[in-house]
Image (cartoon, rainbow, N blue to C red):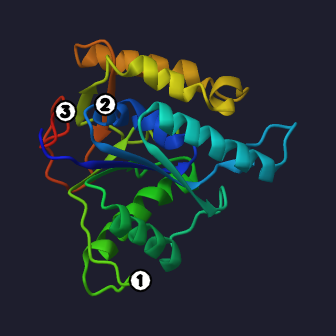
Amino acid sequence: MSEKIHLMVVGAHCGDAEIQAGAIAYKYAKAGHDVTFLHLTAGEKGNPPHISVEDYREQKMKEAEKAAAILGGKSITLDYKDAELNEEDETITRVAKIFRELKPTIVITHWENSMHPDHARCPRIVQAAWLKAALAGFDIDGLPPHSLTRMFHSENWEDMEGYIPDVYVDVSDEFDTYLEALSQYWFIMNSSDFRYYDYYKALGTMRGCLARTIYAQTLKYPVGANIRKGIAIPGFEL
């Protein structure tokens, strides 16, 4: 693929985007494409006992920047509050403005069914922002319209209801760097509630087995989309 693209991964909290599609993002960054991780909240309310919510927010934003740098991308964290994400027009317009400013080609985000309300709202915000960014009838600070080419969902342990992968992306060469990026997050390495690092290492291994490769990460088309199953992002194969 000769044309340069911009791959954006949108997560509800710092850490979501990276665990879900960090290896895929790094695959495209290595090939010379632009990569952005957009976090709608910091995920600060999962703070450990030794640190305040506000201090943990700052810590997670710094961890996000370190992880993004390792994966060849940039990190943006918005100031919405963890566990209070809403689908109001202000939120949608803000994300639409980012789409018009940064002009992503492909956006990867959460699957629509989740036990976490922020996760479930995130893809709906993305879809609504895509429409608003694309339509010239919406004036957003005078910025020209921009439409995404494709949107995909990605895999998160909290979002597994009805998640059946359509695309398996071989990330064998990227997986060690992906794990290094994950290790920048305190919660991934130290959570007593869930073994994040072990889970996503095992998930990459399992998806790699099904894809007949060493490691893989998966993507799913939105409901109602024209599905083209495969082993690479259709139209953007590397």
Q: Quadrant of the N terminus?
A: top left
Q: Position of residue 207 (x, y in %)?
A: 33, 21
Which residue is nearer to you in this view: 22 or 210?
Answer: 22
**Dot 2 amino acid type:** Lys
Mark before the other along the chain sequence, 2 or 3: 2
Q: Measuring 73% from the left and 26% from the top, which residue is drawn there?
A: 192
Disc 1 residue crowd, few under 14, some 14–19, many 20+, Cα 10 Å: few
Tell me the SS state at disc 3.
loop
Report the residue marked by disc 1.
141
Q: Position of residue 120 (x, y in %)?
A: 48, 55
Tell me the SS state at disc 2.
helix
Report the residue marked by disc 3.
232
* Label 2 to label 1: alpha-carbon separation: 33 Å
Q: Position of residue 85 (x, y in %)?
A: 59, 63
Q: Is residue 230 above or below residue 95?
A: above
Disc 3 residue crowd, few under 14, some 14–19, many 20+, Cα 10 Å: some
Q: Quadrant of the C terminus?
A: top left
Does the CB distance between marks 2 and 1 fall below 8 Å?
no
Q: Is residue 123 above or below residue 217?
A: below
Left or right: 71, with 64 as reference point: left
